[in-house]
Amino acid sequence: MENKIPVEELTQLVVDALVGAGASNAMAQATARSLVAAEMAGLGGHGLSRVQLYAQHVREGRANGTVEPRIAHEKGAACLIDARGGLAYLAMELATREAARRAHEFGVAFCAVTHSHHCGAMDFHLVPLAAAGLIGIGFTNSPAAINAWAGKQPLFGTNPIAAVFPRAGHAPLIIDLSLTEVARGKIMVAAKEGRPIPQGWALDADGKPTTDATAALTGSMAAIGGVKGVLLALMVELLCCALTGAQFGFENDSFFEPGRPASIGHALLAIDPGALAGSAAYAERIETLIAAMLEDEDVRLPGERRHRLVAEARANGITVTDAVLLQLRELAA
């Protein structure tokens, strides 16, 4: 059975679940905002499905539930925020605020986060930048999933890249993608059900393409676009870790197995269109491109579906299965 739960009620359930596991109210609130927003946008893999895992990591000490992030280093338009081993969301909110403030002052800003945990749907952290009239680009690394080209061992994370582009009088364009052909969760489901997976999704432990889901789970994920996707994953590792001091994908343990505290890196780039050709020129140029795209009636703008789903969820509540709702209520009790 499915239930329609108001956004506010669901958010409070997530807060209570995380506070019950040992998180501070501030950390729980920031985390709940992101997870519920992802669920509203139809991104279940970054939504309520993460609550139990986060609560477990807080209880086990893999994520510190009570620390407050701080600015560790700063210079002009750049700053480094130390999440101090906590859940990512308070640190990411600080990074977003700093990126917006510095971009308005300097025209551009680069704010990174170190010693962090999983940061969920990356576009969530960029939407406030678009609301402030700024272009936002975000990156994060993650535990190892992708081999170096021609290699056998996973080294790089799925390493999502996201961007938001504000529009005058319209919702922003939202682009958000991981650098693997498919989410690992789909392979896990196929392995559990004994089904093969399509060619091109994953590699086995010897670095060879496989359709065996079980073999894929002991191997690695295939990058989008072959070597081009691998090099993009490498780029994200360097931006998020070499610049921040965080651990590379191969140095972090899987979130889904017992392991050590995470030390993930995230990075946000904010750009003020007014600092370049000017806000009016930017607005004209982006609308010209969008108009050309929409001349084809089959084209859907990136982020369009998410905006629609979020509006529906705010008006009618979020659809939650009995099993998920029971789990949340047990965690929150």
Image: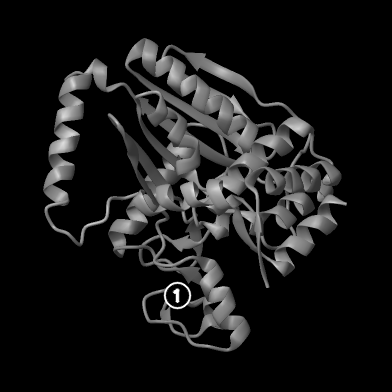
283 to the left or right of 235: left
In the picture, residue 73 is in which quadrant? Answer: top right
188 to the left or right of 239: right
Q: Is residue 35 above or below residue 3?
A: above
Q: Which x, y percent locates residue 48?
A: 65, 55
Q: Residue at x 41, y 44 (%)?
A: 236
Q: Which x, y percent locates residue 231?
A: 33, 53
Question: Which residue is most to the right?
Answer: 333
User: SS class of the residue under badge 1?
Assistant: strand
Q: Quadrant of the N terminus?
A: bottom right
Q: Which x, y percent locates residue 39?
A: 57, 53
Q: Nearer the viewer, residue 50 or 325?
A: 325
- Colour scheme in use: one colour
Q: Is residue 190 above or below residue 119?
A: below
Q: Residue at x 74, y 57 (%)?
A: 52
Instruction: Provide the residue designation for mark 1.
Output: 203
Q: Nearer the viewer, residue 246 or 167?
A: 167
Q: Residue at x 40, y 46 (%)?
A: 161
Q: Is residue 62 visible?
A: no
Q: Is residue 199 visible?
A: yes
Q: Nearer the viewer, residue 26 or 102?
A: 26
Please give the count of numbered marks on the rendered protein: 1
Q: Is residue 83 above or below residue 206?
A: above
- Amino acid type at circle 1 is Leu
- The crowding category of the residue bearing disc 1, from other C-alpha atoms within 10 Å (few below 14, some 14 to 19, many at least 20), is many
Q: Residue at x 42, y 25 (%)?
A: 110
Q: Which x, y percent locates residue 291?
A: 14, 44
